[in-house]
Image: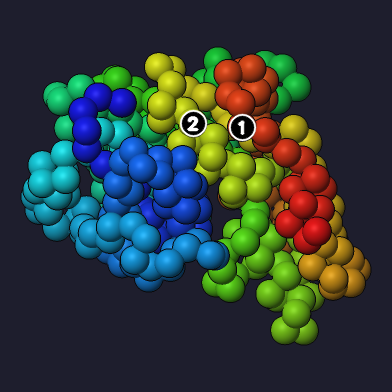
Amino acid sequence: MAGAGPVLILGGSGFLGAHLVAEALARFAGRRTVVSASRDPGAAPAPGVAADAFQARRVDALAAGELEAALEDLAPAGIVLATALSRVGDCERYPGLARELNVRLPERVAGWCAARGRRLVHVSTDLVFGGVPPAGERYSEDDPPSPVHVYGETKAAGEALALERGATVCRLPLLFGDSGGRGLGASDQVAAAVARGDRPTLFTDEWRTPLDVGDAARAVLELLELPFAGRLHVAGPERIDRHALGRLVLAANGLPADGVDAGTRADLGLEASRPADVSLDASRARALLSTPLRSPADALRARSA
Protein backbone atom coordinates (compact mmCIF):
# COMPACT_ATOMS: atom_id res chain seq x y z
CA MET A 1 0.00 0.00 0.00
CA ALA A 2 1.29 3.42 -0.94
CA GLY A 3 1.64 6.24 1.57
CA ALA A 4 1.61 6.36 5.33
CA GLY A 5 -2.13 6.74 5.76
CA PRO A 6 -4.51 4.51 7.70
CA VAL A 7 -6.38 1.41 6.65
CA LEU A 8 -10.00 2.39 6.13
CA ILE A 9 -12.87 -0.07 6.53
CA LEU A 10 -15.97 1.33 4.85
CA GLY A 11 -18.92 -0.45 6.41
CA GLY A 12 -17.03 -1.28 9.59
CA SER A 13 -20.11 -1.66 11.79
CA GLY A 14 -21.63 -4.56 9.82
CA PHE A 15 -21.22 -8.29 10.43
CA LEU A 16 -18.18 -8.65 8.20
CA GLY A 17 -17.07 -5.07 8.82
CA ALA A 18 -16.66 -5.53 12.57
CA HIS A 19 -14.42 -8.54 11.96
CA LEU A 20 -12.45 -6.59 9.35
CA VAL A 21 -11.79 -3.91 11.97
CA ALA A 22 -10.69 -6.51 14.55
CA GLU A 23 -8.41 -8.32 12.12
CA ALA A 24 -6.96 -5.05 10.80
CA LEU A 25 -6.06 -4.01 14.34
CA ALA A 26 -4.14 -7.26 14.74
CA ARG A 27 -2.55 -7.27 11.29
CA PHE A 28 -1.44 -3.62 11.20
CA ALA A 29 -0.59 -3.13 14.89
CA GLY A 30 2.24 -0.62 15.19
CA ARG A 31 2.19 0.05 11.46
CA ARG A 32 -1.07 1.77 10.59
CA THR A 33 -4.10 3.29 12.24
CA VAL A 34 -7.39 1.50 11.58
CA VAL A 35 -10.44 3.60 10.79
CA SER A 36 -13.99 2.28 10.75
CA ALA A 37 -16.35 4.43 8.72
CA SER A 38 -20.10 4.01 8.39
CA ARG A 39 -23.31 5.71 9.42
CA ASP A 40 -22.80 4.23 12.92
CA PRO A 41 -19.10 3.26 13.01
CA GLY A 42 -18.52 2.68 16.71
CA ALA A 43 -21.69 0.82 17.56
CA ALA A 44 -20.59 -2.78 17.19
CA PRO A 45 -16.92 -3.71 17.39
CA ALA A 46 -16.22 -7.40 17.01
CA PRO A 47 -16.19 -9.56 20.15
CA GLY A 48 -13.18 -8.74 22.29
CA VAL A 49 -12.44 -5.41 20.58
CA ALA A 50 -12.69 -2.25 22.65
CA ALA A 51 -14.65 0.55 21.04
CA ASP A 52 -11.68 2.92 21.52
CA ALA A 53 -9.12 0.59 19.90
CA PHE A 54 -9.77 2.06 16.48
CA GLN A 55 -10.74 5.42 15.05
CA ALA A 56 -14.46 5.69 14.35
CA ARG A 57 -15.66 8.04 11.64
CA ARG A 58 -19.29 8.72 10.87
CA VAL A 59 -19.75 8.90 7.12
CA ASP A 60 -23.07 8.91 5.28
CA ALA A 61 -22.26 7.76 1.75
CA LEU A 62 -25.64 9.04 0.55
CA ALA A 63 -25.00 12.61 1.70
CA ALA A 64 -23.62 14.73 -1.13
CA GLY A 65 -19.85 15.10 -0.90
CA GLU A 66 -19.56 13.63 2.60
CA LEU A 67 -17.70 10.49 1.56
CA GLU A 68 -15.25 12.34 -0.68
CA ALA A 69 -14.54 14.89 2.06
CA ALA A 70 -13.80 12.09 4.53
CA LEU A 71 -11.48 10.36 2.06
CA GLU A 72 -9.53 13.57 1.47
CA ASP A 73 -9.25 14.18 5.20
CA LEU A 74 -8.19 10.65 6.11
CA ALA A 75 -6.00 10.01 3.04
CA PRO A 76 -6.06 6.24 3.56
CA ALA A 77 -3.31 4.06 2.12
CA GLY A 78 -5.76 1.21 1.59
CA ILE A 79 -9.52 0.79 1.67
CA VAL A 80 -11.79 -2.20 2.09
CA LEU A 81 -15.26 -1.42 0.81
CA ALA A 82 -17.74 -3.59 2.72
CA THR A 83 -20.69 -1.19 2.55
CA ALA A 84 -23.70 -2.50 0.64
CA LEU A 85 -27.45 -2.88 0.67
CA SER A 86 -27.15 -6.62 1.13
CA ARG A 87 -30.58 -7.92 2.10
CA VAL A 88 -32.16 -9.34 -1.03
CA GLY A 89 -35.65 -8.23 -0.01
CA ASP A 90 -34.51 -4.67 0.69
CA CYS A 91 -32.93 -4.46 -2.76
CA GLU A 92 -36.19 -5.58 -4.38
CA ARG A 93 -38.17 -2.99 -2.39
CA TYR A 94 -35.67 -0.16 -2.83
CA PRO A 95 -33.89 -0.65 -6.17
CA GLY A 96 -32.81 2.99 -6.31
CA LEU A 97 -31.06 2.71 -2.96
CA ALA A 98 -29.50 -0.59 -4.06
CA ARG A 99 -28.04 1.16 -7.11
CA GLU A 100 -26.64 4.00 -5.00
CA LEU A 101 -24.91 1.71 -2.49
CA ASN A 102 -24.04 -1.30 -4.66
CA VAL A 103 -23.20 0.40 -7.97
CA ARG A 104 -22.55 4.09 -7.55
CA LEU A 105 -20.62 3.83 -4.26
CA PRO A 106 -17.99 1.35 -5.57
CA GLU A 107 -17.57 3.57 -8.64
CA ARG A 108 -16.95 6.63 -6.44
CA VAL A 109 -14.52 4.94 -4.07
CA ALA A 110 -12.62 3.19 -6.87
CA GLY A 111 -12.39 6.45 -8.78
CA TRP A 112 -10.91 8.23 -5.76
CA CYS A 113 -8.37 5.42 -5.26
CA ALA A 114 -7.41 5.30 -8.93
CA ALA A 115 -6.74 9.03 -9.05
CA ARG A 116 -4.40 8.81 -6.04
CA GLY A 117 -2.78 5.42 -6.53
CA ARG A 118 -4.39 3.87 -3.44
CA ARG A 119 -5.28 0.22 -2.95
CA LEU A 120 -8.96 -0.84 -2.87
CA VAL A 121 -10.46 -4.25 -2.18
CA HIS A 122 -14.15 -4.20 -3.00
CA VAL A 123 -16.19 -6.91 -1.27
CA SER A 124 -18.72 -8.65 -3.49
CA THR A 125 -20.84 -11.78 -3.34
CA ASP A 126 -21.49 -15.24 -4.72
CA LEU A 127 -25.02 -14.05 -5.51
CA VAL A 128 -23.82 -12.42 -8.72
CA PHE A 129 -24.36 -15.98 -10.01
CA GLY A 130 -27.24 -18.42 -10.15
CA GLY A 131 -29.09 -17.72 -13.37
CA VAL A 132 -26.82 -19.83 -15.60
CA PRO A 133 -24.91 -22.94 -14.44
CA PRO A 134 -21.11 -22.67 -14.12
CA ALA A 135 -18.81 -23.99 -16.81
CA GLY A 136 -17.29 -26.38 -14.26
CA GLU A 137 -18.49 -27.93 -11.02
CA ARG A 138 -18.46 -24.56 -9.25
CA TYR A 139 -18.39 -20.93 -10.37
CA SER A 140 -14.89 -19.69 -11.15
CA GLU A 141 -13.70 -16.14 -11.67
CA ASP A 142 -13.98 -16.75 -15.43
CA ASP A 143 -17.74 -17.43 -15.36
CA PRO A 144 -19.80 -14.38 -16.37
CA PRO A 145 -22.27 -13.07 -13.77
CA SER A 146 -25.83 -14.37 -14.07
CA PRO A 147 -27.80 -12.81 -11.21
CA VAL A 148 -31.45 -13.61 -10.53
CA HIS A 149 -32.41 -10.59 -8.41
CA VAL A 150 -31.71 -6.88 -7.92
CA TYR A 151 -29.07 -7.49 -5.27
CA GLY A 152 -27.03 -9.71 -7.57
CA GLU A 153 -27.56 -7.39 -10.53
CA THR A 154 -26.38 -4.31 -8.66
CA LYS A 155 -23.40 -6.05 -7.10
CA ALA A 156 -22.31 -7.30 -10.53
CA ALA A 157 -22.62 -3.80 -11.96
CA GLY A 158 -20.64 -2.35 -9.04
CA GLU A 159 -17.91 -4.93 -9.54
CA ALA A 160 -17.51 -3.98 -13.19
CA LEU A 161 -17.17 -0.27 -12.44
CA ALA A 162 -14.68 -0.89 -9.62
CA LEU A 163 -12.58 -3.18 -11.83
CA GLU A 164 -12.49 -0.57 -14.61
CA ARG A 165 -10.87 1.77 -12.08
CA GLY A 166 -8.21 -0.66 -10.92
CA ALA A 167 -9.82 -2.12 -7.80
CA THR A 168 -9.59 -5.73 -6.67
CA VAL A 169 -12.93 -7.51 -6.29
CA CYS A 170 -13.21 -10.17 -3.60
CA ARG A 171 -16.31 -12.34 -3.95
CA LEU A 172 -17.40 -13.89 -0.68
CA PRO A 173 -19.94 -16.66 -0.02
CA LEU A 174 -22.46 -17.09 2.76
CA LEU A 175 -20.67 -16.07 5.98
CA PHE A 176 -21.14 -17.51 9.45
CA GLY A 177 -19.50 -16.89 12.80
CA ASP A 178 -19.61 -14.80 15.96
CA SER A 179 -21.67 -11.63 15.59
CA GLY A 180 -21.22 -10.47 19.18
CA GLY A 181 -24.76 -11.29 20.22
CA ARG A 182 -26.37 -9.42 17.34
CA GLY A 183 -27.85 -12.52 15.70
CA LEU A 184 -26.19 -11.79 12.36
CA GLY A 185 -24.73 -14.18 9.80
CA ALA A 186 -25.75 -17.68 8.82
CA SER A 187 -24.88 -19.30 12.16
CA ASP A 188 -25.91 -16.81 14.82
CA GLN A 189 -29.29 -16.19 13.17
CA VAL A 190 -30.15 -19.88 13.33
CA ALA A 191 -28.78 -20.43 16.83
CA ALA A 192 -30.63 -17.40 18.19
CA ALA A 193 -33.90 -18.51 16.61
CA VAL A 194 -33.70 -22.03 18.03
CA ALA A 195 -32.58 -20.75 21.45
CA ARG A 196 -35.76 -18.66 21.71
CA GLY A 197 -37.95 -21.62 20.77
CA ASP A 198 -38.45 -21.08 17.04
CA ARG A 199 -38.11 -23.80 14.40
CA PRO A 200 -36.66 -22.15 11.29
CA THR A 201 -37.05 -23.90 7.94
CA LEU A 202 -33.75 -24.28 6.11
CA PHE A 203 -33.51 -25.35 2.51
CA THR A 204 -32.17 -28.71 1.37
CA ASP A 205 -32.00 -27.51 -2.24
CA GLU A 206 -29.92 -24.35 -1.81
CA TRP A 207 -26.18 -24.93 -2.01
CA ARG A 208 -23.35 -22.59 -0.99
CA THR A 209 -19.65 -22.75 -0.05
CA PRO A 210 -19.88 -21.01 3.36
CA LEU A 211 -16.92 -19.46 5.13
CA ASP A 212 -16.21 -18.38 8.69
CA VAL A 213 -16.41 -14.57 8.90
CA GLY A 214 -13.03 -14.38 10.65
CA ASP A 215 -11.37 -16.35 7.87
CA ALA A 216 -13.03 -14.04 5.35
CA ALA A 217 -11.79 -10.92 7.13
CA ARG A 218 -8.22 -12.22 7.36
CA ALA A 219 -8.23 -13.16 3.67
CA VAL A 220 -9.56 -9.77 2.57
CA LEU A 221 -6.92 -7.91 4.57
CA GLU A 222 -4.16 -10.16 3.27
CA LEU A 223 -5.40 -9.41 -0.23
CA LEU A 224 -5.25 -5.68 0.53
CA GLU A 225 -1.45 -5.99 0.85
CA LEU A 226 -0.90 -8.15 -2.22
CA PRO A 227 -0.32 -6.83 -5.75
CA PHE A 228 -3.28 -8.81 -7.08
CA ALA A 229 -5.61 -7.36 -9.70
CA GLY A 230 -9.00 -8.62 -10.84
CA ARG A 231 -11.61 -10.87 -9.23
CA LEU A 232 -10.92 -13.48 -6.60
CA HIS A 233 -13.28 -16.03 -5.07
CA VAL A 234 -12.64 -16.43 -1.35
CA ALA A 235 -14.86 -19.25 -0.09
CA GLY A 236 -14.95 -22.41 1.97
CA PRO A 237 -13.86 -25.77 0.55
CA GLU A 238 -17.17 -27.54 1.14
CA ARG A 239 -20.34 -27.34 -0.96
CA ILE A 240 -23.16 -27.72 1.55
CA ASP A 241 -26.89 -27.06 1.69
CA ARG A 242 -28.43 -24.61 4.15
CA HIS A 243 -30.15 -27.29 6.23
CA ALA A 244 -26.95 -29.30 6.73
CA LEU A 245 -25.10 -26.12 7.70
CA GLY A 246 -27.80 -25.25 10.21
CA ARG A 247 -27.50 -28.65 11.88
CA LEU A 248 -23.72 -28.20 12.21
CA VAL A 249 -24.23 -24.77 13.76
CA LEU A 250 -26.75 -26.02 16.32
CA ALA A 251 -24.54 -28.92 17.37
CA ALA A 252 -21.56 -26.57 17.79
CA ASN A 253 -23.67 -24.31 19.99
CA GLY A 254 -24.89 -27.12 22.22
CA LEU A 255 -28.40 -26.97 20.78
CA PRO A 256 -30.39 -29.91 19.36
CA ALA A 257 -29.40 -30.52 15.75
CA ASP A 258 -32.99 -31.40 14.92
CA GLY A 259 -34.16 -27.93 15.96
CA VAL A 260 -34.53 -26.85 12.34
CA ASP A 261 -37.03 -28.05 9.77
CA ALA A 262 -36.00 -29.18 6.29
CA GLY A 263 -37.74 -27.57 3.32
CA THR A 264 -37.28 -26.58 -0.30
CA ARG A 265 -37.48 -23.28 -2.07
CA ALA A 266 -40.54 -24.57 -3.90
CA ASP A 267 -42.29 -25.17 -0.55
CA LEU A 268 -42.24 -21.40 0.03
CA GLY A 269 -42.59 -20.33 -3.61
CA LEU A 270 -39.03 -18.98 -3.77
CA GLU A 271 -37.58 -20.92 -6.69
CA ALA A 272 -37.46 -17.87 -8.95
CA SER A 273 -35.98 -15.46 -6.41
CA ARG A 274 -33.34 -17.67 -4.73
CA PRO A 275 -30.69 -19.42 -6.84
CA ALA A 276 -30.26 -23.12 -6.17
CA ASP A 277 -26.47 -23.24 -6.27
CA VAL A 278 -23.91 -20.43 -6.20
CA SER A 279 -20.98 -22.53 -4.95
CA LEU A 280 -17.66 -20.83 -5.60
CA ASP A 281 -14.40 -22.34 -6.81
CA ALA A 282 -11.79 -20.79 -4.51
CA SER A 283 -8.78 -22.71 -5.83
CA ARG A 284 -7.06 -19.52 -7.00
CA ALA A 285 -7.45 -17.92 -3.58
CA ARG A 286 -6.06 -20.99 -1.82
CA ALA A 287 -3.03 -20.89 -4.11
CA LEU A 288 -2.51 -17.16 -3.55
CA LEU A 289 -3.32 -16.59 0.12
CA SER A 290 -1.71 -17.92 3.28
CA THR A 291 -4.99 -17.49 5.21
CA PRO A 292 -6.66 -20.88 5.75
CA LEU A 293 -10.17 -21.10 4.29
CA ARG A 294 -11.69 -23.69 6.61
CA SER A 295 -14.71 -25.91 6.24
CA PRO A 296 -17.76 -25.12 8.41
CA ALA A 297 -17.13 -28.17 10.60
CA ASP A 298 -13.50 -27.20 11.23
CA ALA A 299 -14.26 -23.53 11.92
CA LEU A 300 -17.20 -24.30 14.22
CA ARG A 301 -15.16 -26.91 16.07
CA ALA A 302 -12.38 -24.39 16.68
CA ARG A 303 -14.86 -21.78 17.84
CA SER A 304 -16.50 -24.08 20.39
CA ALA A 305 -13.22 -25.56 21.68
Instruction: Tell me which numbered mark, 2 or 1, is placed earlier along the sequence.
Output: 2
Front in this rendered view, residue 35 or 212 = 35
Residue ID at (78%, 61%): 304
Q: Quarter-wise, where is residue 131 in the image?
A: top right
Q: Amino acid at mark 2?
A: Glu
- Identified at 16% across, 45% down, the residue is 74
Q: Is residue 51 visible to the viewer in this orientation of the structure?
A: yes
Q: Position of residue 3 (x, y in %)?
A: 21, 28
The secondary element bearing badge 2 is classed as helix
Element at label 1: loop
What's the distance in space between the residues labelled 2 and 1, CA to CA?
A: 8 Å
Spot occupied by residue 240 in the image (x, y as percentages of width and height): 79, 43
Q: Which residue is depicted at the point 40% across and 40% down?
A: 28
* Residue 225 position by quadrant: top left
Left/right of residue 249 with respect to residue 162 in the rendered view: right
Image x and y of residue 199, in percent: 79, 75
- What residue is disc 1 on? 291
235 horizontally vs 127: left or right: right
- Mark 2 vs 1: CB contact within 8 A: yes
Q: Amino acid at mark 1?
A: Thr
Closer to us: 95 or 21: 21
The residue that appears at 22% across and 33% down in the rendered structure is 4
Residue 30 marker: none
Q: For residue 84, say whether it is visible.
A: no
| Image: 252 above or below 209 | below
Residue farthest bottom in this picture: 197
Q: Which residue is mark 2?
A: 222
Residue 294 at x, y = what percent?
73, 38
Taking depth in this image into account, of 278 and 240 the one nearest to the observer is 240
Q: Is residue 141 above or below residue 106?
A: above
